[in-house]
Image (cartoon, coloured by chain):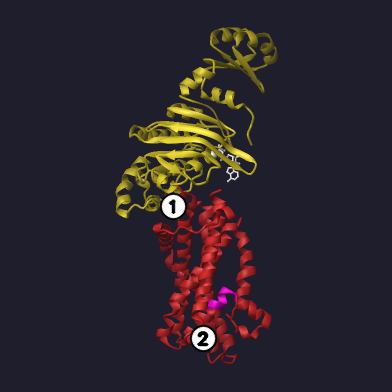
Amino acid sequence: MIKHLRLPRLSWRFIPVWQRNYLVWKKLAIPSILGNLADPMLYMLGLGFGLGSLLPDIDGMSYLSFLAAGTVAYSTMNAATFEVLYSSFSRMHVQRTWDAILNAPMTLDDIMLGELTWATSKSLLSGVAILAVIWGLGLFGNFWMTLWIIPVVALVGFCFGGMGLVMNAVSPSYDFFLYYFTLVITPMVLLCGVFFPVTQLPPLLQSVSAWLPLTHAIDLARPLVIGRVPDSVALHVTALLIYGSLGYVIALALTRKRLLK
Amino acid sequence: MLKVRGLTKTYGDTEVVRGLDLDVRRGECFGLLGPNGAGKTTTLRLLLGLTDPDSGSIELAGIKVPQMAREARMKVGVVPQLDNLDPDFSVRENLLAYGRYFGMSKAAVTARVPMLLEFAGLANKADAQIAQLSGGMKRRLTLARALVHDPDILFLDEPTTGLDPQARHLIWQGLRRLLAEGKTIVLTTHFMDEAERLADRLAILDHGRRVVEGAPRALIEAHIEPAVVEVFGEGLADWTRAHAATLCLRHESVGETLFCYTATPDSVIDALKEVPALRYVHRPSNLEDVFLKLTGRDLRD
Ligand SMILES: Nc1ncnc2c1ncn2[C@@H]1O[C@H](COP(=O)(O)OP(=O)(O)OP(=O)(O)O)[C@@H](O)[C@H]1O
Ligand SMILES: [Mg+2]
């Protein structure tokens, strides 16, 4: 691993990889978008309407708005994670598409940057779809403010794309990804304030939560939904960038070890 | 076109490639032969800069590898041992996508597609999905894909393994056409007839070492007696004891068969005719005899 750890050499050659994934996706775009939307929508509307009427406002916003803001981040995270886990893995391991690309004048740095930017693009779409629902249901405070959610979603996609690539690099099979969901993603959803405010947690868990990327994502998205400027923007943005970049660099080293040894 | 010196690669405790030297000239077809696990695929991966050697130097089309592997791969077309066509794309889309990985514009690839499809005999399959292709078609498409950027040199890793005779002949015709156009080919294969047919020169590898190198005919003449009589049937052991040493220049018993290597097959056959229980096959010696003589008859895995 150490031998393979070095700074990535970024080049524009990642674009054909991104484009490859885009062209394949385009063939099935409509079902893919609907599939992406259905799950978070069901949660949001089911829980929001069902539970929301029983609950008081949280920090001056209805439970439905509160949950919608959490869902933007949550759904974006999921879209990026699924893409770099299941889809990238089938391209790398099952179909050996990466091997084919490596025979061209491409490096693993290019391929994985292509995968990362593609996962970011897909999660951007996912996040914007939820945003559209927020617009449609009028769950926002200030429309112009909600436009800032678009770059936030892209950043969140980048962060979880980079992290997920590490899993992709070490996984022997699809089954392995279940560990990541059980041990990382699901706890994160519960600890980071998607469904209820982090302040409800015991102090120890609150301090854990402060370190988790989804918390940073939600701390940016939620104020923007209700029309406020988020606190500590630089901190949250930096944290998400660091998680994503570190993930990409580590994943690159591990994948070099896996494919280029 | 290709110059390799002292190439070494170790995986764990095993030296998979040991001090390999190779020279391939422009326009020739060079065969890499060797039993399973001899290091053929690993050698090709080293030549492409897909893995770093432990020692040794590689110059591919005048470019140093692995230092400038990206530039070197621009000049090479690769047919890998295992097909890795893109199953999410049609035949045509596979070529278009692959061209983009070489930095070609869509127009430049599109202009080459009809020629490539014709070369692969897939002109009427342009819009077929990969899953609908036969093994031979897939192999031909992989070959066409390797030519998308009009490379000077081709690396073919077992291009006809698993294909029926018709499909193999079609691939061979394609390769001859490429050689006639002046392309250089490096080819690995387990088929001795394929190597004899296509390769101008070849090297036999075993345990990562080059055992021998030369033109197929020259190797046969240098290493093997001109003819082989394979004998089998009831009473073989007695006959072998009585006659093999005097009638054969060299002989070898493998299971229930005697391989009698000789320059005068007629005298062996005359003697065999007196023992009706014994059956035999008489044939000129070939590359396979050289291969088995030099690498032994033991299974490798
Ligand atoms: N990535 C790897 N890690 C560890 N060992 C490897 C790796 N790749 C190849 N080997 C080992 O190196 C040896 C040579 O393998 P290689 O694939 O180069 O052989 P080959 O001559 O192409 O064989 P075949 O005719 O079966 O294709 C084998 O023993 C193989 O198990
Ligand atoms: Mg091989």
- Amino acid tagged 1: Met
Colour of chain A as rendered = red
Three-letter amino acid code of the residue under disc 2: Ser
Using the image as rendered, state which of residue A83 and residue B73 is in the foreground.
B73
Task: Kindly identify which chain the residue marked by label 2 belongs to.
Answer: A
Chain in yellow (letter): B
Horizontal relation, residue B195 to residue A57: left or right: left
Q: Both on one chain, marks 2 and 1?
A: yes
- Res A106 label: 1
Residue under the point 38% across and 47% down: B125
- Rendered image: mark on residue A65: 2
The disc placed on residue B144 is: none
For the magenta stretch, what is the residue range? A211-217
Work out whether residue A124 or residue B134 is closer to the camera in this orientation and state it.
Answer: A124
Viewer-proximal residue among A149 and B16: B16
Q: How far apart are the two marked residues, 2 and 1, measured between alpha carbons?
A: 45 Å
Q: From this viewpoint, is residue B43 visible?
A: yes
Q: Secondary structure at mark 2?
A: helix
Q: Nearer the viewer, residue A251 or B229?
A: A251
Q: Residue at x 50, y 43 (%)?
A: B45
Quarter of image, res A206: bottom right
Give the image location of residue A53, x and y in percent.
57, 90
